[in-house]
Amino acid sequence: MQDDTATATALRWWETRTFAVALVLLSAVPLLWPALPPLADLPGHMGRWHIAMALPTAPDLQRYYAYHWALIPNLGMDLLVPALARLVDLEPATKLAVITIPMLTVAGLLWTAREVHGRVPPTAIFALPLAYAWPFQFGFVNFALSQALAFCALALWIRLGRQDRLVLRAIVSVPIALLVWVAHSFGWGMLGLMAASAELARLRRDRRPWLPTLGTVAVRCLPLAIPLIVMIVAASLAPARTGTIGLGAVDWFDGTAKLLWVLSILRDRWRLFDIASLMPFAALLYVATRSPRLGFSALLGWPALACLAAFAILPRLMMGGAYVDMRMAPAVLMLAVIAIVPSPGHTRFATMLAVAGTAFLIARLVGTTVSFGERATEQQRELAAVAHIPRGATVLSLVQRPCGNTWSDLRRDALSGMAIVRRDVFTNAQWALEGQQLLRIRYVQAAPYLADPSQIVLPKVCRTFGSDFDTAIARFPRTAFSYVWTIGFPPGAAKAVDLTLIWTNGGSALYRVERR
């Protein structure tokens, strides 16, 4: 592995700040048109943010929910969106906050590449579509924000290390680590892994012995470990809890799932287009390992290998969270691609790479823009039901999901969260995992339809969680719910004499529960 240092020649077009700023701005384009960013889990998060903001003055919400602020490592957008909502309403505040995530991710990748190579290599442009990778599309917005912050922090870490300003780096690393940790603990873990690997690569470049080098790296990374103190103190002050938190047993070394995560790195709407879009990465990495015209920087190559090892080791389910290992897959590819740099003296080849990378980026952004436009239309068609729900109502949400992992998820599981935002209702689609959210469900009479995933309905042949549609319609507590919103089930599918159809779009329906 080798580092390509800056030369005294004039900057080429892809190395200029103007082009970098243009790339950052261009990354926002897919999110400009939809009023609601069409990310899978986002409506559910918006419901939680609305509850946090409106609860003190909303009697309806006070009957259903409790919200107690505490310092937990999953608050990135939970802090940012309410802050922006002081200036604008919640929905435009959410859109503004979500737009910052891909822009900050692109800025962090370009900055990191520049700090390592001296200039932005043309190969780095290929990594930028990964700002819209599947974890972001899934709506893991707190994680995506913390990952973007982690890349920016990595760039600063490498810069100060290169300048031998180790004391300053240690000082600023404390608040930076806390900031990334508060946004999401997984991003903080990524930052520690990347920074330690980059520091190890930098020290080993001088052929220092392994054992003292590892000790030096551990000492220098101690400021990044400050959140551990917060976690230990919080655990010691927390009351004793019984039971377990999570989705069940962890799922270690699921090779089939990991292969799917790799194929799904750019997963959005069109399977062929999304999988074919991985080919430029494969070709670029293959050529970089075989051709003398390309090389790798150890400062980023080692972090890429460390993240690859984490992806292989991490389980799919852990501590109440799902898709744990999947979140690491795009980061591995980001680091591996920005580690590549053309060797000096191959200007024409570098220009070809810059043109190809820019074309690839534009193709992906155009596809994502079209996809988001269509998804926004689909979501608004379903959200027309919200206008027919009275303020403060209680809504049983049942969302159809097919068997298998269909490539183009309709992104409806958390859609009823918008009824919370717009109507202050209770619905059974909120997450309420202790230690991961600050929201608590008070409306116990809705049991067993209290929280996610009770709104999800899978066919019986493949159901491992969620609800059975016919059973739910027959047995849900009538005194607890005043409306039933069936998404993906045509009108009349809910067969109960006390349900009156009041709205349908032909594929979904809203029923009023008639009191007897």
Image (cartoon, grey):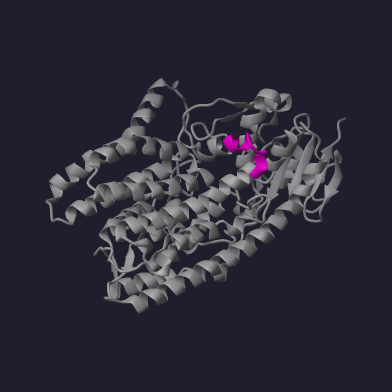
Q: Which of the two residues, 477 or 355, is positioned nearer the viewer here?
A: 355
Disc tally is 0
Name the side, left or right, on which 81 lies relative to 109. Answer: right
Find out whether residue 131 is within the magenta segment. Answer: no
Q: Residue 2, relative to residue 242: is it above or below?
A: below
Residue range in magenta is 82-92
- Is residue 431 in view from this perspective? no
Q: Residue 70, relative to residue 212: is it above or below?
A: above
Question: Percent x, y for residue 162?
Answer: 25, 51
Residue 405, image quadrant: bottom right
**Quadrant of the image containing the N terminus:** bottom left
Residue 473, image quadrant: top right
Question: Percent x, y for residue 133?
Answer: 50, 57
Name the side, left or right, on which 183 lies relative to 78. Answer: left
Name the side, left or right, on which 166 lies relative to 93. Answer: left
Question: Percent x, y for residue 479?
Answer: 78, 29
Q: Which of the two residues, 129 or 375, is positioned nearer the viewer here?
A: 129
* Dominant secondary structure, magenta: helix
- Is residue 226 in view from this perspective? yes
Q: Residue 279, relative to residue 442: is it above or below?
A: below
Q: Residue 473, relative to residue 110: is it above or below?
A: above
Q: Which of the two residues, 18 or 129, is positioned nearer the viewer here?
A: 18
At horizontal 59% and vertical 38% (from top left) the residue drawn is 84
Question: Percent x, y for residue 259?
Answer: 44, 62
At horizontal 49% and vertical 39% (from top left) the residue drawn is 320
At horizontal 37% and vertical 24% (from top left) the residue drawn is 233
At horizontal 46% and vertical 61% (from top left) the residue drawn is 18
**Quadrant of the image containing the C terminus:** top right
Find out whether residue 91 is within the magenta segment. Answer: yes
Name the side, left or right, on which 275 lies relative to 185. Answer: right
